[in-house]
Amino acid sequence: MRPAPALAAIDPADLASEPLARAGTIPSAWYTDPRFHDIDSELIFARTWQHVGHAAQVATEGQYLVSTVADDPVIVVRGRDGVLRAFFNVCRHRGGPLATEHGCARALQCRYHGWTYLLDGTLRGVPAMDRTELFDRKDYSLVPLRVETWQGLVFVTLDAAAPPLETFVAGIAERIAPTRLGDLQFSREVRYVVEANWKVYVDNYLEGYHVPYVHPELVKLYDYQSYVTEVFDWYSLQYTPLTGDNALYSRDGGGDAFYYCLFPNFMLNILPGRLQTNFVRPLGPARCEVVFTYFHDDVESAAARQRIEDDVAYSDAVQAEDAGICARVQQGLASRAYDRGRFSVKYEAGVYHFQELVRAAYRRGLAGGAVPRTPPPPLSRD
Ligand code: FES
Ligand SMILES: [Fe+2]
């Protein structure tokens, strides 16, 4: 079991909302106080849909992928009946893992003492348990989780009461049409560790204000002042049409760039024939992992392979600049000199929107008690 988070670290006075033009940023303690790692895990990550992988990883019977959601290990597996299921990747014996990396199997065998579960989570094989009394295998199935797929991307939530995934992504598929993300093919995954709280990374993603100062090369390629930020219930969008000068990304001298940030920690960077997702996973109070996953419409031809190389190299350089500034900002937020700041109405509507959703999540947490989770199946001991 996970210890309850120290909700007393949240000062109710910090939860009041103000309009953007009058609002202050969230307090620096929310980025620096180590208690907020568990608070965010419980009040934000355990209650939202979390990206865990893409559909091609679990396309056929027995294929599974592993991830973590709100610090809990999870496994998503395609059953013999073709149904996609998710479970806590936690054996009911003594907590061992069913898998430690992605793979494919006819059954899920715990890596610790070999208990074996069918792909639907039912416990089947239990070596050397014949002298254990009042033990019924049927009481020890894997604990299920909700899983949904959208546009070829797989999401899991720990919250049994969360609205369907579609609620959170409503309107995106229509907006980006005729692009269909699910038609693109996986091309590359790159992982980065950033020495900053996950919220620092998300804040930074959500504004182009820093671009001329942090990315002097990028600013030549993009007319960042033309970016429009639009906010929706659970995501915000930075949008710009592409011009012909953008040789790397525009197609036939045109196209659109869509940069979506889905609350709380998932980004869709959509350019013609190309999707790159960023998934931000907190590793601790002042450290996060950012997983970049690339998908392209052509992954075969020599020209396409070169384009992918260029795309990854370019993003890598931009990411290094963002990671560098985020680490410095984390230090600044922890300074005795700093508590909270203000927003540019012109450039930081997306940051404000994200921070308001964090505030709302904390408000709900203070008002509400424990996360409504799928409980483990009951044990019978008659
Ligand atoms: S913990 Fe899984 S078999 Fe022991
Ligand atoms: Fe940046």
Image (cartoon, rainbow, N blue to C red):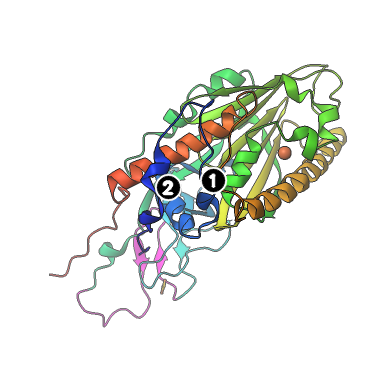
Compared across the picture, whether 23 is left or right of 5 comes to right
Q: Above or below — where is 218 with respect to 86? A: above
Quarter of the image that includes the N terminus: bottom left
Q: Point out residue 89 in the picture as x, y percentages from the top left corner.
A: 45, 60
Q: Residues within 10 Å of mark 1 (few under 14, many from 20)?
A: some
Determine the residue positioned at 47% across, 64% down: 98
Type of amino acid at the residue the image marks with label 2: Arg
Q: Above or below — where is 292 with respect to 185? A: below
Q: Point out residue 323 in the picture as x, y percentages from the top left corner.
A: 71, 49
Q: Point out residue 310 in the picture as x, y percentages from the top left corner.
A: 84, 39
Give the quarter the ligand 1 occupies: bottom left
- Badge 2 vs badge 1, beta-carbon distance below 8 Å: no
Q: Which SS class for mark 1?
A: loop
Determine the residue positioned at 60% across, 41% down: 202
Report the residue that reaches farthest toward the bottom. 131
Type of amino acid at the residue the image marks with label 1: Thr
* Main SS class of the magenta portion in the image: loop
Compared across the picture, whether 250 is left or right of 199 comes to right
Q: Which SS class for mark 2?
A: strand
Distance from label 2 to label 1 (Cα)? 12 Å
Q: Which circle's residue, 2 or 1, is located before the other in the chain? A: 1
The answer to which of 382 and 263 lies nearer the viewer is 263
What's drawn in magenta, residue-wise?
A: 113-134
What label does residue 85 carry, if any?
A: 2
Compared across the picture, whether 1 is left or right of 56 comes to left
What label does residue 177 carry, if any?
A: none
Identify the residue under disc 1.
60
